[in-house]
Image (spheres, rainbow, N blue to C red):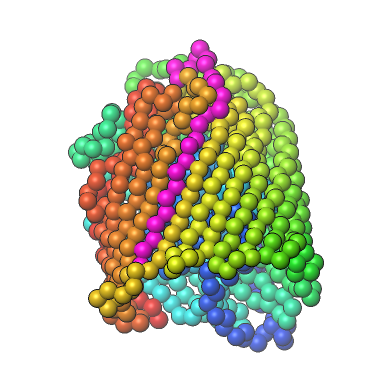
Amino acid sequence: MRARYSAASWAVLAIAAGGFCAPVWAQTPAAAQAPKAAPAPADGDVVVVYGDRLSNDPGAYSVIDGQTIVDIAANHPAEILNTVPGVNVQMNSGQELLIAIRSPVLPAGAGQGSFLLLENGVPTRAPGFGNVNALFELHHETSEAIEVVRGPGSVRYGSNAVHGLINFIDPEPGAQQGQTLTLSASSLQRYRADATANFTTNGVQNWVGLSVMEDGGWRDASGVEQQKLTLRSKFGGETWNAVATVAVINLNQETAGFIQGPEVYKDEDIATTNPNPEAYRDAWAARANLRFETNFGADKLIITPFGIMQRMNFIQHFLPDQSNEDNGNDSLGVLTRYEFGPENFRWAIGGDIQIADGFLKEVQSRPSFGGTVLNPTFPQGTHYDYDVGTWTTGLYAELDWDFAPGWSLLAGLRGEAHQWDYSTNVAPGTRGRFRVAPNRTDEFNLLTPKLGVVYSGMEGLVVYANYARGERAPQTSDQYRLQNLQAIQRLEVETLDSYEVGARGEAYGVEYDVAMYRMYKDNFFFRDSDGLNVPNGKTRHFGIEAALRGGLGEIAGGALGWNANASWSDQRYDFDRNVAAAAEDIFRDNKIDTAPDWLADAGLSWETPVFSLGLSAEYVGEYFTNAANTARYDGHLISHLRGVWRFSDKMEAFVIVRNLTDERYADRADFATGAARYFPGEPLNATFGVRIRN
């Protein structure tokens, strides 16, 4: 792996060290006393502290609570996130994935830049340096809650919060006591250990989470070794408190590639094969931040300096040239937010700064398509080798106004500026399909308003209407990793306007959350099925989402409950494209590929003090796999069974049977260079585990 470290790398380490030395420096007599243990926060309180939205804010959002995270015991983020309406995370091989939130499943730069990933409200990557697989960098295994905002994020976040955001919330130090250890093994050669600990040292409350997984892989020549570690410390004085967080992940993966041919995922023998046994992905990331909060009467100031380091090396097994890519970036930033004003006329203003240094090198070490003859379209050698320095600044203001009994208005505006300084380490020019731009500087400016109205004057009911704009600067790979047919120019800022109405509440013992939205996106940059970049696409999106939950009383000494969510969407291209170089034409009103009309998830649960059982099913509807709407995937329905036996308050055993009916399905169905290709879904498998609490 390429060892390239900038000054920002060492600054990240300094923030990490400083964050955990700060409790010692802060030991004034008032702070040195061991604070009283706080009660475990409720789901809503968690979102108040670190989340993007409050329960009475306009706009759709979901919170996956800590018990659900424990029950699902997800080996892959998709297994838990796909229980949220409007979300479709596709598993590829190992820990690889692609995300959709009120969108098609988006690969490449669109997939990197359309969804904002947060850890306790802090971005996990710098704008412009995304990774479509970045969910594996988050510690979902030990999270206390996961918040999913559907649609553009609030004005406190800028670039990348376009289609939605996902916020992984760690346990608050001191909110819980004791330790936990979970050990599990599966019939697919997958072994896991997850451990958490809470302790107090010199009056400082600490929490640590550790997750280790070794996955032997159910397909040939595949497997994953993954380690995640998160440490948090909380300390403070009489009028202030601070939480320091350090998170580190490491991934070593032997990757299985696409299998090709019409519906070959239905063939058990072919599904287990690996056409790309040479493929791999090695990655690590480290993050550190220090969240400082102080009150001035009813006013509140929050300052969060943070640092990020990332490195990744992998073979692009999904492209014809199968080049090796080496990339990384280091960044430093600070988030500030000041809340003030009376309770019924509350203001928040904030400013963010983030600087980053990144690099990317792509080298093709062999002839294309695994042959022995050189292909001038995909020449051997170095395709790209460049460095990019970025500087991002943002300012925002937000007003929460209770303007009449039962009525409130939330309005905000954010402005953001990006400056990128690009330099190439190889000669500019065009070789085959690859174009190298000369050194240049680019600037991007974003302006994102938000306006929402909420009515909560009826008991058990909240209704809202919301407008929000999401914008994103292009990814650095979109701007500088050019193809031969692309002009060397500054790409346009992608813009999405979202209009939404919704209601949430409880009636007749049923909790419900429904929403309807219409969105329009301009300057959509994506790669078509011919592998060609489209810089100026337009799309439109319409959808309805519903989440329901309730109880069915007591049966056989246990409480019976149910939950269901469903989403229907109509997502279409809103432009025409007919160019001689492309075999695939795009016409206005074509459905966007990899955008199922229907997504659904439902479950039944039965629980006693000793036993619990859960049966769930997830449905993905049919979808086109190319923009021309000539190839499709029929969709699938899979089910899972979970059971827990509690020996005592401190020990329990569990079993999880995934794909209960042994359905032959595709996690991802795709169409490229004239061929159908798939990542097959896992067959029937069982996981057995034990969980110990102390």
Relative placement, left or right, of 36 versus 685 is: right
Does the stretch in magenta take in 3? no
Residue drawn at x 65%, y 76% is 235
Residue drawn at x 29%, y 49% is 638
Q: Quadrant of residue 339?
A: bottom right
Q: Which residues are magenta?
A: 561-584
Q: Is residue 555 visible?
A: yes
Q: Is residue 9 visible?
A: no
Relative placement, left or right, of 638 versus 549 is: left
Q: Position of residue 211 (x, y in %)?
A: 42, 63
Q: Position of residue 625 (x, y in %)?
A: 39, 31
Relative placement, left or right, of 296 versus 469 is: right
Q: Nearer the viewer, residue 501 or 432?
A: 501
Q: Quadrant of residue 247?
A: bottom right
Q: Is residue 507 above or below residue 382?
A: below
Q: Nearer the viewer, residue 127 or 453?
A: 453
Q: Position of residue 636 (x, y in %)?
A: 31, 43
Task: Give the position of the C terminus as an image quadrant.
Answer: bottom left
Q: Position of residue 14 (x, y in %)?
A: 65, 61
Residue drawn at x 47%, y 32% is 592
Q: Is residue 158 above or below residue 176?
A: above
Residue drawn at x 61%, y 43% is 498
Q: Is residue 144 above or below residue 260?
A: below
